[in-house]
Amino acid sequence: MKLTNEGLQAKEIWQQKGYTLPTFDRQAMLKETEQNPTWVHFGAGNIFRVFPAALQQQLLNQKLTKTGIIVGEGFDYEIIDKVYDKHDNLTLMVTLKSDGSIDKEVIASVAYAYKCDPQFAKEWEFFMQTFRKPSLQMASFTITEKGYSLRGGNGEFYPAMVADLTNGPKKSTMFLSKLTSLVYERYLAKAGKLSLVSMDNCSHNGQKLQDAIMTIAHAWVENGHAEPGFVTYLKEEVTFPWSMIDKITPRPDAKVEAMLKAEGFEDTSLVITDKNTYTAAFVNAEESQYLVIEDLFANGRPSLEKAGVFFTDRETVNQVERMKVTTCLNPLHTALAIYGCLLGHTLISDEMRDSELKALVEKIGYTEGMPVVVDPKILNPKQFIDEVLTVRFPNPFMPDTPQRIATDTSQKLAIRFGVTIKAYLASEELDVKNLKLIPLVFAGWLRYLLGLNDELRPFTPSPDPRLAEVQTSLVDIKIGMQGPFPSLDDLLADTTLWGVDLNAIGMAELVKTYFAQLLAGRGAVRETLRKYVH
């Protein structure tokens, strides 16, 4: 069973083994896509292969569209060489269900996949021709939040971006510059309106994309590399819908690889690129998925609502994201990450079988978060959090780790917990002093920063841009100390960390009290949790 066009000819073998195959005419799809492309996607990674690509396959199977997706990869070119080309742009989607069962479906909706860079002349010409065609409705993106940044941490443009702004569209090197040059080709060809749709998991993603493209366009106009009308075109004929995406797609799992190999599926080996992308012919992912998009399309769009996508207004997209990020999923993930590292867990699913940790996230979510949750109406917050805590997090097939989730925690606390604290402060009915477990998460993070688990064995904290900085406030703190920890005062007042000044709102003392208990000695983390969550 080889994942190629030729290999799929033996349909009976695949179907006997429980694999779902595409039912549409792929050759007709390829021809129609080349002649009248409608959708280009940039970012060839795993989430695209089993979410947007799978959505388009549903439309193709239902004869609701005739075109597939053209894929461009502008960062990690090995993905094209070692995965897409090798497997004729096919992907095996392995859906890992919480009841222990799995679904296997071959996704064939990608028509063409190429490296997106002028150095690859033939491929670059293909993208330019595609953007010149009036049929093109949208370009979408899964390039990660970092992909939208033009500047470094010092606020200055990256040197490569400075060169791109200076040299203009014909000599672009960074992805967003290359994208802007393709849109400029469309403008010059008078090919009409277009929508650029970020599908990355970051707040106000459409605004981030729009700001970046407009910055590049303005610079090119000012430097004489683009016509002044290009900026007007971007403002009047190109839209940048906002979206919220939610689906966990971990790295290819060894257990899944072994299962597929036992069934006779070939090419299960893991590919690790030079840029540290983990991928394979198959992508394993959870069943739950949500995609909510602002219905702001300038040149039409695929009927993705028929495949489960929610189309709505910008405010509702914002509300769905806030519901997820500040109450129903992300804060619970972070709480599990911090305490999971301290207690020696290596899987989020295992943590949900730990009675203290299960009680911790249930109370943070239901007791402390839900009274101030934003209700976007199109999704029910109670049902969403129920699914997170009873289906998604406990899923034994999901090889997600607290160590991965703990990455960049300093960047997450202010949004994931600070927004809830601010909502309590703004409420006339709720008292911020009733928040007991969010401060326990804060204290847990301080304990985590010491790099000693509950057995007092060293561990390496996950990467975090502020790790060294915040650890300086704890450099003199040792296991067994009782406080009052004056070295923490400035840290606890840092609104960029917590979202609020914990000293000013009276929460710092509770955090310190918890912290002292977590520091008491071996087993103190478990004892403190047991004391407060039951």
Image: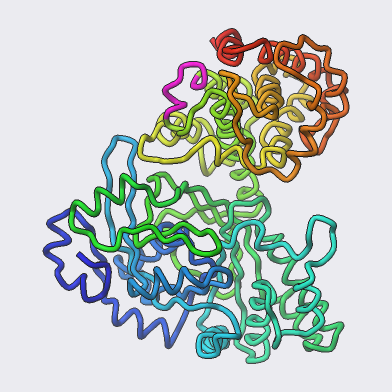
Please provide the residue range marked out in magenta.
350-358
> In this image, 434 relative to 44: left or right?
right
Q: Residue 176 in the image: x percent, y percent?
A: 67, 72
Q: Magenta segment: does it hold 291?
A: no
Q: In this orientation, which residue lies closer to the viewer: 349 or 130? A: 349
Please name the predominant secondary structure of the magenta segment in the image.
helix
Here the colouring is rainbow
In the displayed structure, 15 sits above or below 302; it is above
Q: Specify the farthest residue to the front.
A: 457
Residue 414 in the image, given as x and y percentages of width and height: 73, 36
Q: Quadrant of residue 488?
A: top right
How many numbered discs sit on the rendered protein?
Answer: 0
Placement of 368 over or under 67, stated as above or below: above
Name the spot of residue 36 as percent of width and height, x first: 44, 84
| 162 left or right of 254 in image | right
Residue visible at 72% across and 80% down in the picture: 233
- Can you give x and y, in whole percent of width and height, for residue 88 in the image? 33, 75
Q: Nearer the viewer, residue 514 or 38?
A: 514
Q: In the rendered view, does 140 fall on the left or right side of 91?
A: right
The residue positioned 74% from the left and 67% from the top of the image is 212
In front here: 205 or 351?
Answer: 351
Q: Who's the residue at 57% across and 83% down the image?
A: 131
Q: Is residue 75 left or right of residue 154?
A: left
Q: Quadrant of the N terminus?
A: bottom left
Q: Quadrant of residue 195?
A: bottom right
Residue positioned 17% across, 61% down in the render: 14
Question: In the figure, residue 412 lies in which quadrant?
Answer: top right
Q: Nearer the viewer, residue 322 or 170?
A: 170
